[in-house]
Image (cartoon, rainbow, N blue to C red):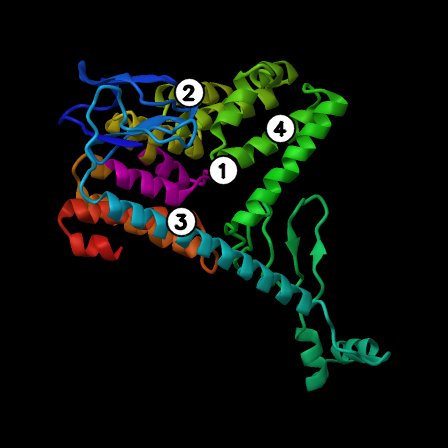
Amino acid sequence: FLLRVELPAGMGGKQVCSNILHRSMTLAIGGKSIIKGKFCGMVDADECTWSIEDGFVEVILIKSNASWWPGLIEGEVYVPGVGNEDRKKKKRQQQQQTVKKEAEGKRTQKQELTQVRATQKRPARSHNAPKQQRTAERIGVTKAPQQQQQQQQPQKMKKKKNQEDRYVTSTGGTVFGKKGHGVTNDKGNEGEIITNILQIEAKWQAAFDESKKRLGLDHPATLEAAFQLMDQWIGNYRLSRIDNLLKGPENLMAVSKKAGKQFYIRAVQMLAFCRWKQFRFRESLNLFYEFQDLVGKSAILLENMGHTHNSLGETEKAEQCFEEALDRLSKGDKGNKGGLLMGLGVVKKGRGDFKGSARLLYQALKFYSGEYKGVMHSIIGKCHSAIGRSLEALGGCMRAQNT
């Protein structure tokens, strides 16, 4: 279920009070009760979230099973809305497109692997060819066309030491990136192929389970495997798993704190990201400030704080964070310029500066299009979506639709 309730002007996240349980929920805005009652079924409360999008409070409710509900809240009369069939048809089309994209991704991956294998085959050369080539280079004689053609052949793929899952060719061919999620472009930036992503997650799951069984949860090797696994989970939105591992019976937060500062820092950061994606923004922000106390301020951390302040409706603080982070980048600090431009663009949209928002979002799109040229990445789609919303707010509906 997706509920959308218009947020009154001048109100933000602080004025929204939501409590979602397995069998009931309450939602109040500015002290006024909007929804209160028992569900017609059960929901997975840990996966249910709410956020503020384009002046509306959006509540996402995930049913605990696929059973049919006569409505949402008991006692309410359910009247099918106009266009339900259209929405179902659109959902089926989206599912078909998703399946089609996954199939295309598999075909692309297979073609790339075929191309890489093809580059490993060298043409036959005579026994004396290498010696003749070196002699020509030493005396400065122009090489024969046959020798030039042989030199241009891509060499076999080699695995660099101490760089797990990162493969390169000596001629800079198309290869898989460090994360193993997809192929890299000429800038070394990595795309996303869902089959690869799920394989890497399964690999780290097996490594964590094996290390925990043999060495125990508090062993450094087990903790390293745990954080590598959670890195995959956070990208795949396995939020309940992260929550359970860090704060559940195994309490990896406490284990990490005992193991040393380097592990506790990573645990705080991971929980902050998890809370953010669970829409528990205030908890996330407090964790980011704790992280700042541990490691100091940086452009990357300021970006995360900016997004969190904005999600809480604290747009002035969010703008300050993004602008300070951009200033740090200009002075040599490391960070993600595209993310900062995009975050600042979203903030300006929320404050009514639609032209300024669109300008910054176009800059972010240009940045990411260059960074991920030639590979597939979801951030490009997010930029287009954000630009479309800004143009729609400006009244450019046709331009928004084309974006």
Residue sitting at 28 percent across and 28 percent down?
70
Pointer 3: what residue?
95
Q: Tell me if residue 326 comes above or below residue 158 in the rendering.
A: above
Query: Real-space Cα distance between discs 3 and 1?
Result: 18 Å
N-terminal of the two: label 1 or label 4?
4
Disc 2 from disc 4: Cα separation? 23 Å
User: Residue under circle 2?
Assistant: 289
Q: Amino acid at mark 2?
A: Tyr
First in sequence, mark 1 or 2: give its number. 1
The earlier-in-sequence mark between 2 and 4 is: 4
Disc number for residue 226: 4
Q: CA distance from mark 1 to mark 2?
A: 25 Å
- The quadrant the N terminus occupies is top left
Q: Are marks 1 and 2 in contact (CB under 8 Å)?
A: no
Measure the alpha-carbon separation of dots 3 and 2. Answer: 40 Å
Tell me the amino acid under the disc marked 3.
Gln
- Sequence-wise, the earlier of marks 3 and 4 is 3
Q: Residues within 10 Å of mark 1 (few under 14, many from 20)?
A: few
Secondary structure at badge 2 equals: helix
Up/down of 255 relative to 1, above or below: above
Please rate how many residues cluster around mark 3, counting C-alpha atoms within 10 Å: few if below 14, some from 14 to 19, many from 20: few
In this orientation, does residue 105 appear?
yes
Mark 3–mark 4 Cα distance, whole angstroms, equals 32 Å
Front residue of 201 and 297: 201
Tag in front: 1 or 4? 1
